[in-house]
Image: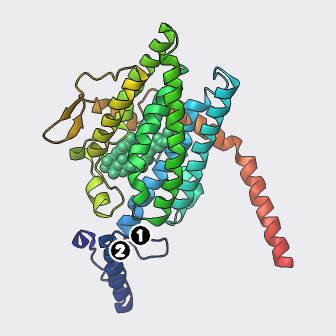
Amino acid sequence: MASQNLQSVPAELSPEEQERERAGQAYFDRIIAEDSRIEPRDWMPEAYRRTLLRQVSQHAHSEIIGMQPEANWITRAPSLKRKAILMAKVQDEAGHGLYLYSAAETLGQSRDKMMQDLIDGKARYSSIFNYPAVSWADMGAIGWLVDGAAICNQVPLCRASYGPYGRAMVRICKEESFHQRQGFEILLELSNGTPAQKQMAQDAVNRWYAPALMMFGPPDDDSPNSKQSMAWNIKRFSNDELRSRFVGMMVEQVRVLGLTLPDPEIRFNEETKKWEHGPLDWNEFKDVLAGKGPCNAQRMERRRQAHEDGAWVREAAAAYAAKQAEKEHAA
Ligand code: FAQ
């Protein structure tokens, strides 16, 4: 494994610097081989730092953009209790974004720059948040399927080799479990309601099933980052492996809901001992990533507007911090 991490030491460095690079690489290789943790001040290969920054900042952006489809339903939730629960969930997503931006900042990039990259359309966020939430039942399907997929993908990330990311994921996963339960419960109640309510729940599951499966990323053969990320103990399982595990989880749970998954080709392969699903429309996935999904423009427009609307808060916080620093300096 260590040999995959080797980088050549740049010749333009002084002999002392070259020595430091070699020692840093040897330390990094040992930590990875021991399945231990890299911390912010440790030496790390530039490509490892960039890969993490990409994944963690994308993850943070997903949490922030991911607030939108559900926030849109807070005022329309069917009872005070449902409003309170949904509001708490959306606030949790904001918190996840903040832990993740903090973890990404330890890799040497400011939160302002990350946010600017998102606003300028230079950074990605999860494909799933470019789909519309058209009925109350979609709150159930998002909680059950989207948070369910997020948990399946993120529990292994609690063991990611980069300390700040892994530690952030522990708390995030605990909160995601609550989110999934609340989604499941919304669907269960609708499924046990009138025939029209049950149909609403089924329609929502039909809408969110395939996009949720695509959250795990492209098929392994088409996933340029997986191999190296797995060699570095960032990702622990491939995209297809996690997708298959997720299908297996959902097959069990959908029975309890009294609903069905819109995929007649789901089966357990006795030979490989893996769950298999029907074909997914990867052209649709590529379109969504290229900004051509049903809600990409709307999501970005809202984020830009929220950023502009929040300018006075950032200015006030900066002015307050400057005043405090001045006071401390004077004391
Ligand atoms: N959407 O080589 P791979 C949540 C990109 S949080 C958009 O396989 P990698 C909680 C990928 O970036 C959901 N882009 O890449 C919640 C790469 O492009 P790049 C977010 C995607 O990184 C619930 C290219 O395709 N979760 O739901 C997607 O090894 C409810 C090639 O792909 C995370 O971010 C996609 N689905 O694997 C919040 C988890 N998939 O960057 C609110 C952490 C792939 O080279 C409400 N991230 N791409 O230009 C990961 O586990 C990984 O980054 C993957 C992608 C698995 C997403």
Question: What residue lies at 45% left-to-right and 21% top-to-bottom?
Answer: 204
Q: Quadrant of ligand 1?
A: top left
Above or below, 202 relative to 101: above
Can you name the residue that lies furthest to the top here? Answer: 195
Pointer 2 with pointer 1, Cβ within 8 A:
yes
Q: Is residue 24 visible?
A: yes
Coordinates of residue 11 in the picture (x, y in percent)? 30, 83
Coordinates of residue 129 in the picture (x, y in percent)? 48, 34
Q: Tell me the amino acid under the disc marked 1.
A: Arg
Of residue 227 and residue 306, the one placed in the foreground of this image is 227
Q: Quadrant of the C terminus?
A: bottom right
Q: Secondary structure at mark 2?
A: helix
Above or below, 108 relative to 64: below
Q: Quadrant of residue 229?
A: bottom left
Q: Is residue 120 visible?
A: no
Q: Tell me the amino acid under the disc marked 2.
A: Ile
Can you name the residue that lies furthest to the left here? Answer: 271
Give the residue number, with chain letter if any, for mark 2: 31
Give the residue number, with chain letter if any, for mark 1: 37
Question: What residue lies at 28% left-to-right and 29% top-to-bottom?
Answer: 281
